Image (tube, rainbow, N blue to C red):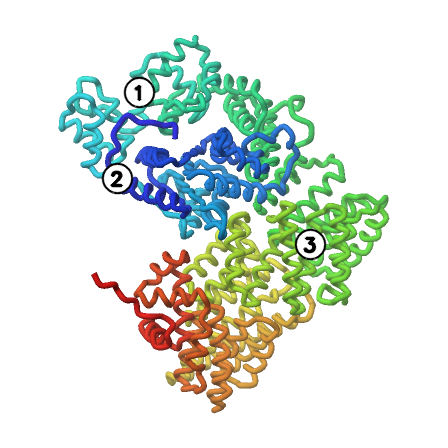
Amino acid sequence: MTQTFGTPFIGRGDELSRLTGVLERAGDGEPRAVLVAGDAGVGKTRTLTEAAAHAAAAGTTVLTGHCVDLGDVGLPYLPFTEILGAAAADDRLASAFAAHPAVDRLTGAGRGTDTAPDPGGRLPLFEAVAGLLADLAGITPLLLIIEDLHWADQSSRDLLRFLLSRGVLQRPAAGDPARRLAFFASYRADDLHRRHPLRPLLAELIRLPAVDRLELRPMADADVARLVRALRTGPVSDSTVRGIVERAEGNAFYAEELLAALPGDDDPVSPVMPSGLADVLLIRIEQLSDTAQQVLRTAAVAGRRVEHELLREAVQLPEEELESALREAVGRQLLVPGADSTYSFRHALTREAVYADLLPGERVRLHRRFAGLLAGQARSAKNAAERAHHFRESHDLPDALTASLEAADHAQCVGAPAEELRHLEAALELWPAVDAGARPDGGTVALTLRASAAAARAGETHRAVHLTRDALARVGSDADSELAARVRYTLAGNLMRIDSLKDAFTYSSEALALIPAEPPSYTWVWAAATHVMAARHVGRAEDAERVARQALATAEQLRLADAQADLTISLVGMEADDRRTPKGRERLRRARELAHGAGNFPVEMRALFSLAIGCYESGDLEECLTWLGDGVDRARRSGLLSSPYALELRYLQSLVLYTLGRWDACARAAADDAEVLPAAAGFATGPALYVALARGEHEAAVGGARALLDGPFDWMSALVASIVLTDAAARDGDAEEAVRRLRAAAESLTDASGTGPPPVVVRLAALALSAVADAAEESRRSGDPAAAGRWAQTATELVELARSTAATGGKGGEQGPEGVAWLARAEAEWLRARTGPDVAAWERAVTAFGYGDPYELARSRRRFAEALLAAGRREEAGEQARAARDTAVRLGAAPLREELEELLRRGRLAGSPAAAERVAALTARESDVLRLLGRGRTNRQIGEELFISGKTASVHVSNILAKLGAASRTEAVAIAYREGLIAPETTPSA
């Protein structure tokens, strides 16, 4: 930390103790992070400065990075570039940097040799930074500080998410050096409006066990008074102190500025003094000499921080006058000198107030001066972004356009698609205001299509559609027909990504009509390939097959291997030997090889997805996982993890892990992907919500599902959310809500597809039917035949919906094993709603779910056991109930386990496992939890001692109760003592 203060540290002793406690734990090898929140001026920087001084005095290396507000100009990875640049200058750390050359892209060491765009370098870069920081923390205790996180660019937020949730805060493997690392990051809480991009990241990070949040609240009045008296060298009257305390409202910076604005004779705070902080700051600044004010105004145009040489050239003052002015500004603590020959405004609000007070002409002139000076410096990502900002603010639009495009190129090079998109959109805004002769090569349509591609890579699918529509609007009637067709089929492809299928078909038809099939051309082939997919989506199968065969012949004639692959994939989906058959999958494998050889990653992703979904639909889940792993790994390496088919691969991978009962792997994969996937791709990790709901984390699952419904409609997000919310309503016993959720989902998902209800409606109907059947049974038990009849009628309507949906197979195909199982479940629930549990129906459901879904098999076994019990077949009922309970225990499905325990007790079903068998079933982690239960620990305390969450500890406790056959924690401990699993602890005598 280069910033120093000459005032005493008052009123933040508790907060500092928390930070120093974290530093001590980090020094012992327990890496931790603290998010420091507070309003502007409340004392975040000062508190961090004290903590940094404490760390440095203890031998810790302190590295600080700052986020900068440059308006709409992105500056990718700026705080990390600053941190790593400072570390790279430390000779002690050179060996660590040598082991991670990928980090050179942020430090600038590799800029001269690596200028080509590298869209696939984002994840390797993140991993390299994490590895480097881990190595640095092995060399020296390390404190990383990032200030003003509310101004962080998206790429910096993504890297921070990666580091804290998967990288530097993880405990090292056995034998690796301890990670003596602490991470402090500050942000303005009052700047975080409801849609601020930092809010979801903070909500995610604060749930991590190694991340704490420290909120700096307004200081107590007594502390503000102490601060005011300590700041004043001479005596200060009580009335002055009271006035400042009242106006400061607990904000230390406000108090300091109000005091500094007082005249030297210590008059009370004048009632005519402006109450706004900006006015207070300007009054203080006006007390400076004219030259010092000129320097501050110039520095304010540069930003929060400015290099000495750049400021010197901008103010154009003799060296002695400049030094005198700077000494005056530093002496008044308006500017703070940095060790790297820079000057920073002591507080961002100071800079904002000075900048806002500039005259319009003065502001333009200074921006023009900085732009010209930066133009003479070496090109870099920072330089390009700053030039774009200054040129735009100085109304030098041609140079602003050029710099924006250069900044976009730099953002692409470092794998920052969101920043690339912002720069490209800035260029598009500037384009019409720049004379044609001053514009770079290439037209506005091509530039808009590039922006659309960047939006797609950033996961902004709706933005990609908007930009492609804009490109279409820019295509004039006299435009080249090939360009016009390209825009239309690109728009059609983007529309399919957001499930606007009818519009996609319209534009793909227009694209095909613009280009003749003869003579053969690249553009016609790809327009046809896009049209084939769009036609299939809207049920035009004959049209799709005809065009596909014609286009495949043309692609073979032109030797367009990737187009051949794409069209082959489409044709496999329309033939009898489809993706579910060995012959169809062999053709898909050849298509994948063609696409890979041609270097067309999106088509390769489509082939891999088709292979995986074919295996899934045919019940070959293990083979499905193999293809999914191949596809996801390929997507990561190619930088296409956010592309449509890659996202669907990731969703399917998560779904298969859930289906197979590998719930921990499903949850871990979701947590890992949350670090690198865009917010719009939440559906890809949706099956983790199924896990949370099944394990009893009801609020988290429902909250996550509702979050998927925020923003523009997304078909996959709506599907995932509908499953969670319908099942949650059924578990709550709210049959009306479950039915409402089912019907709303069927309507919205059908509208989007345009081809009838999708297959998922069968599953949703079965889930809603479970609640309807419960309501019908309860009505019969309570003696209300009218209500029972109404629920039975509702059940008939729902089962008819399930039957009609299953009959279509979702676009004409037959139901796979999963669809057959869910229809069997729906039929069994329908019978339960009408007349009660039916043994044969539930036996069919149990058999159907035997294809490889242990959880749904267990849920069906529970109902089967109830039916058997009602039929007097007690021994068979007990077998089914115990088998289901064992599955529930293994999966950690606490609600289902409790239901089965209740069934076993209520039915007095004999044959429960012996104590020795129950004891043997305890895992090593459950044994650890049981030991702590014996010590009287709460779930939270267990989680802290075992470094797991309190919710996970609760799941382990539930599993222990089930395995020991205990009704309470106390009984479980008693059984454990009796069986010798734990021994009573003795206290040594004094």
Furthest-bottom residue in this view: 872
Q: Quadrant of the N terminus?
A: top left
Q: Earlier in the sequence, mark 3 or mark 2?
A: 2
The residue closer to the viewer here, 544 or 973, is: 973
- In this view, 560 is above or below 258: below
> Of marks 3 and 1, which one's residue comes earlier in the chain?
1
Q: Marks 1 and 2: in contact by CB < 8 Å?
A: no
Name the amino acid, label 3.
Arg
Q: Position of residue 456 (x, y in %)?
A: 61, 44
Left or right of 637: which side holds 718?
Answer: left
Judge from the rendering whether residue 750 lies leftward or rightward of residue 210; answer left or right: right
Residue sitting nearer the eye, 587 or 124: 124
Which label is found at residue 606? Answer: 3
Amino acid type, label 1: Arg
Residue sitting nearer the eye, 857 or 465: 857
Gap between marks 3 and 1 measured at Cα: 63 Å
Q: Which mark is residue 13?
A: 2
Q: Nearer the viewer, mark 3 or mark 1?
A: 1
Q: Amino acid at mark 2?
A: Gly
Q: Residue 332, labelled with which disc?
A: 1
Residue at screen point 37% across, 24% down: 336
Q: CA distance from mark 3 to mark 2?
A: 58 Å
